[in-house]
Image (tube, rainbow, N blue to C red):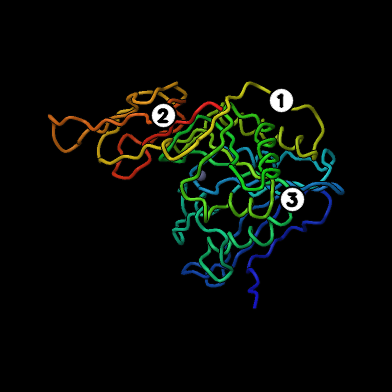
Amino acid sequence: MTITNPISATVDFDQDGVQHGFLKLPHSHDDSGWGSLVIPITVAKNGEGPTILFTGANHGDEYEGPIALFDLAQSISADELSGRVIIVPGMNYPALRAGKRTSPIDGGNMNRSFPGNPAGTLTEKVADYFQRTLLPMADTVVDFHSGGKTMEFVPFCCAHVLEDKAQQARCIAAMQAFNAPYSMMLLEIEAASMYDTAAENQGKTFISTELAGGGSATAATIAIAKKGIRNILRHAGITQGELEVDETINLDMPDQSCFIFSESDGLFELCVDLGAEVKAGDLLGRVHDIKRTGQVPTDYHAKIDGIFSGRNFPGQIAMGDFLGMVAVRA
Ligand code: ZN
């Protein structure tokens, strides 16, 4: 027996025009016995054409996506469109409200919750709604990420290596159209339960981003998100106009030697800044013992030649934390 997802939408996905509404998910808790989790959504549609699905705050402490998408939702005009735009600025909405990576209600990490479960936790129910209702409507899927409070990246748009090479080519073309300062063939650490994988398994043209991080956003990184939205809408044929094209640096992550993880706890001394060209063996960072003076720090080196593309953001680091990442020029 197929279990129906408990989410109901207050918007009609087939209606022309711009509708601002909610995804309502029953959430019975101490402060509201028959209450709901109410997730904002905008649908803008004009006639027949392709559908693009935009999401922000898959992780709730990553801000370029939600800022650019709330702005898109309030400014979009159906007259300019040929097709449909679905905007969910706060995919993990409790996490966005709390400014946290994961949901404060159930601890759910949205991007480790796919394909979801209609009878599971709140986060799993939302994931199931994307899996079985929203993703099937979409031709192109754009999911905004940044580093959050614990990581920072050079601003990149990314695609993945896929078995279906025709689909991979569509995703790469979309990444190039987005035209972030860096374009990355991203190697994932844990792909199985990600939204990315769910969208790709349904054959969608899928791109994601990492636009800086640190738990905030800058004017420059927000501008990258907004330009990417304008470009991908044109690339998808939903709006008219020329792409706005600036230089992009193409990067690849061939294997796990790109990643450096900490094997010590302490103060994190960054030794090169993001975007730096490094050689294998170059010192990237050091970890100082915070408990006593007179200790030699632990050094961490690049394993390959490339561009220093991601780093631990906080001033302290712990055993097992992501310390940094080197990607190679493609
Ligand atoms: Zn993220």
- Residue occupied by mark 1: 244
Three-letter amino acid code at the position of disc 1? Glu
- Residue occupied by mark 2: 304
Mark sitting on residue 267: none
Q: Dividing the picture into quarters, in which one does residue 230 lie?
A: top right
Q: Secondary structure at mark 2?
A: loop
Image height of 150 relative to 7, above or below: above
Residue 323 point in image, percent of width and height: 36, 36
Three-letter amino acid code at the position of disc 3? Val
Image height of 218 relative to 170, above or below: above
Q: Residue at x 74, y 46 (%)?
A: 85
- Residue occupied by mark 3: 43
Q: Earlier in the sequence, mark 2 or mark 1?
A: 1
Q: Is residue 146 left or right of residue 131?
A: left
Observer-nearest of 220 and 158: 158
Give the Cα distance between marks 2 and 1. Answer: 33 Å
Q: Dividing the picture into quarters, in which one does residue 170 lie?
A: top right
